[in-house]
Image (cartoon, rainbow, N blue to C red):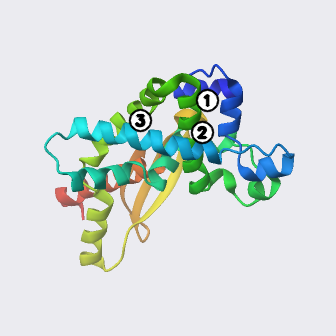
Amino acid sequence: MGEPLEAATGYRFKNPDLLTLALSHKSFASESGSGADNERLEFLGDSVLAAVVAHALYAEYPNEPEGTLSKKKSLLVSRPSLAAWGEELGLGGRLYLGIGEETTGGRTRQSLLANAVEALIGAMYLDGGYAAAEKFVSAWCARRLGNLSETDHKSRLQEILQKRHKTPPTYETTSAAGPDHDKTFSVLVRIGTRELGKGTGKNKKEAEQAAARDALDRISGGGD
């Protein structure tokens, strides 16, 4: 379990026990009797993540005021954003969960994925220092910063369709291809049964935005 995740993160743990701890939910710790879960690492990782993201935003947007930087930071470290990152890394399939948590869909729950990402960052910090954690977070941040400056295509498409048809679009994930740490999602956007656009991305959110952008391109080209 460790090696594929280390390949996905680009970091090899000197102390594999820290990686195991980062992936151990409290339900597993309770049922197994180990008493060791990832909540303390999550607490630590949250602070490291905030520091790295704040620094990245400060450097990337030298002319933006504090309020704008705070909004961007909130988007980057939000639960949906971290959960999407957890999906990219394939953390869901690697979590140690108790039976109850397993049977109720814990592996796909946003809160568990987001918390595991923070715990993973905390484990990296303890294992390799701030530089190791910063490298991992910064690489992700660089990808996400580009998206922050893009238009929210989904919101724009919904606004147009509500005005024209009084109904919102629907999104359908048609495929998820590739290994857990490098999946490509394909999404269709429709209004009723009519297809409006298609898109792909490294997570469902990116694919939905791409599909919405495709739909907007078709609409602007006279296709609606």
Task: Say which amino acid is labelled 3.
Answer: Trp
Task: State the separation of the CA atoms marked 2 and 3.
Answer: 15 Å
Residue for badge 1: 5
Q: Does residue 206 appear in this view?
A: yes
Q: Are marks 3 and 1 in contact (CB under 8 Å)?
A: no
Q: Is residue 121 left or right of residue 155?
A: right
Compared with residue 192, is residue 110 higher up or lower down, i.e. above or below? above
Task: State the separation of the CA atoms marked 1 and 2.
Answer: 8 Å
What kind of element bears circle 3? helix
The answer to which image quadrant residue 139 occupies is top left
Q: Does residue 202 appear in this view?
A: no
Question: Residue 39 versus residue 165: which sits nearer the camera?
Answer: 39
First in sequence, mark 3 or 1: give its number. Answer: 1
Using a 10 Å C-alpha cutoff, classify the residue at mark 3 as few (fewer than 14 neighbours), some (14 to 19) or many (20 or more).
some
Using a 10 Å C-alpha cutoff, classify the residue at mark 2 as few (fewer than 14 neighbours), some (14 to 19) or many (20 or more).
many
First in sequence, mark 2 or 3: give its number. Answer: 2
Residue for badge 2: 90
What kind of element bears circle 2? loop
Q: Are marks 1 and 2 in contact (CB under 8 Å)?
A: yes
What kind of element bears circle 1? helix
How far across and down, in percent of the image, does residue 6 sit? Answer: 59, 25
Residue drawn at the location 60% of the way across and 39% of the way down: 90
Compared with residue 86, is residue 168 higher up or lower down, i.e. above or below? below
How far across and down, in percent of the image, does residue 107 sit? Answer: 67, 50
How far across and down, in percent of the image, does residue 186 sit? Answer: 47, 47
Compared with residue 174, is residue 53 higher up or lower down, i.e. above or below? above
Q: Which mark is residue 125?
A: none
Q: Is residue 79 left or right of residue 223?
A: right
Residue drawn at the location 43% of the way across and 54% of the way down: 78
First in sequence, mark 1 or 2: give its number. Answer: 1
Residue for badge 3: 140
